Amino acid sequence: MIPGSPDFAVSSAKREYGAAPFDPGPSGSANQDLQTLRKARSGGSAILLIFAAVLIVIHLARPFDVFLVGLHIPLVVCSMALVAVSLTGGLRGFATKTGIAFFAMVSWMILVTPFSYWRGGTVGYIRNYVLLLVVLFLAIAQGPRTFEGVKRLMQVLGITVFAAAVVLHWMASSISSTAALQDYRSGGLGMFGNEGEFALLVGFLLPFWVFMASTVRNRVLSLILMGGGSLYLLRVLVATGTRSALFALVPTFLFLLLRLSTVQRFTLIIVTLIFGVIIVASAPDLILSRLAKVTVADSDDSESVHSQDEAVESARERTELLKDGLETIARNPFFGVGAGNFIDYRYSVLGKERHRTWFPAHNTYLQFAAENGVIGGIIYTMIVISVFLTLREINKRRVPGIPDWETVDRMTLCLQSALIFFAVMSAFQNCDKYPHLFVLAGFATALDRVTRPLPPETALPTRPVPGTRVPRRVPVFP
């Protein structure tokens, strides 16, 4: 029974007075009571909420990868956030389902450090993992006090990261006039300069942008932002020439078909077909050739052959990385080679060619198992699953007809779509050092906390019935 719903209001009144002394009123009144109860909930911190917003901008918009690089602003802000998390109760995030999984991951990394191939590298990896990424999760998970706070953070992500994606794409186009076919080569614009990494960012951003646009009150403006922004992001994603991003879009699309209503499904299919025609018609032939030709080069056109040859070489390198990752696991099944050591191990122990060895596994699940043993790989997979299960539990609490819960439903749909895209891309990219999963876990944990039913003692009457005495103060806590 959901706090704020009419049934909850009546049952609470019966517990307090022995009868129902007030009328729960229409859904709007019940919805307002939901807001009141959320404000009465313990937990949350205004300081952490501010840090969460700042950390989202730093980690995903990445402004300091391009500007003020030498000032180490991200390190300073993350250090301050760590102190804030410690002093404001943010460590309670480790008591949640996903928090336990993250704590287990860090603990296991520390436990197997003595068996690491390069202990110094592992210690540095764990330090950055905790200081930069785990703190991000805790700030988002424990910062918001109401679901409105979670919504505001998601809006911040959608707006700032969209702006960053536009600027990054424009700067990359200005710096180089060559097509975006330089897999595994940075575009010189920070963490997401590589085409595959940029495709991951754009695909991850897409559900957040759609959600942000859906919160705009003006219906016409909302549709313009939603349609125009989505079309732009999809065009940019295709322009990266990243095949794994297209693979990830397929299960995301199928999931949306299952979750949406019949009218929404029909609309999604029509919009997808229209966008597909526009994108294919405007995409360079070289990009389309790379996306379409994966195994053989069967064209006489020089540019097409170059694209196909590059695609075939990319597939061969990934196959070799897969074999090396499995061999590393076979040699070190229990403790792995140490966090952050796969690249060095592959060169020094497996004896790969130097000019081709400085690649990660291009499979996050495989790399975690290679570096932290099979147990580490299982823990990472459980983190992803725990986020999805948390969002599923939130969906089960939904009360139809209440506007706030309709908003929460859109929020979970956004987070689930981004999670599916990320989970699939993780099988083709190295995402262990990226903030995406920590952001999703933080949002899911925060939303779970602020929508969890309150104890009966916290119920507040919505509307007194005339002639019925109501106490001046209803205790929030027993």
Image (cartoon, grey):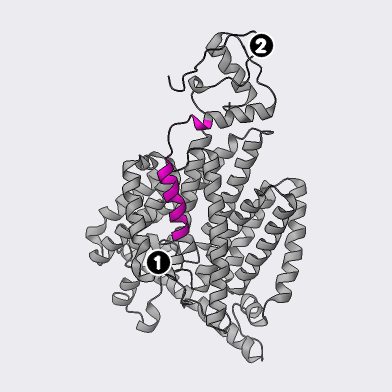
Q: Position of residue 51 (x, y in %)?
A: 42, 50
Q: Nearer the viewer, residue 216 or 233?
A: 216
Q: Residue at x 26, y 61 (%)?
A: 123
- Overall secondary structure of the magenta section: helix
Q: What residue range appears in magenta?
A: 38-58
Q: Position of residue 178 (x, y in %)?
A: 57, 84
Q: Residue at x 57, y 59 (%)?
A: 205
In 3D space, how far apart are the residues under numbered discs 2 and 1 (Cα atoms)?
73 Å
Q: Position of residue 320 (x, y in %)?
A: 44, 75
Quadrant location, the C terminus: top left
Residue marked by disc 2: 466
What kind of element bears circle 1? helix
Count of picture labels: 2
Q: Nearer the viewer, residue 347 or 96?
A: 96
Q: Residue at x 68, y 58 (%)?
A: 225
Q: Amino acid at mark 2?
A: Pro
- Determine the image quadrant of residue 44: top left
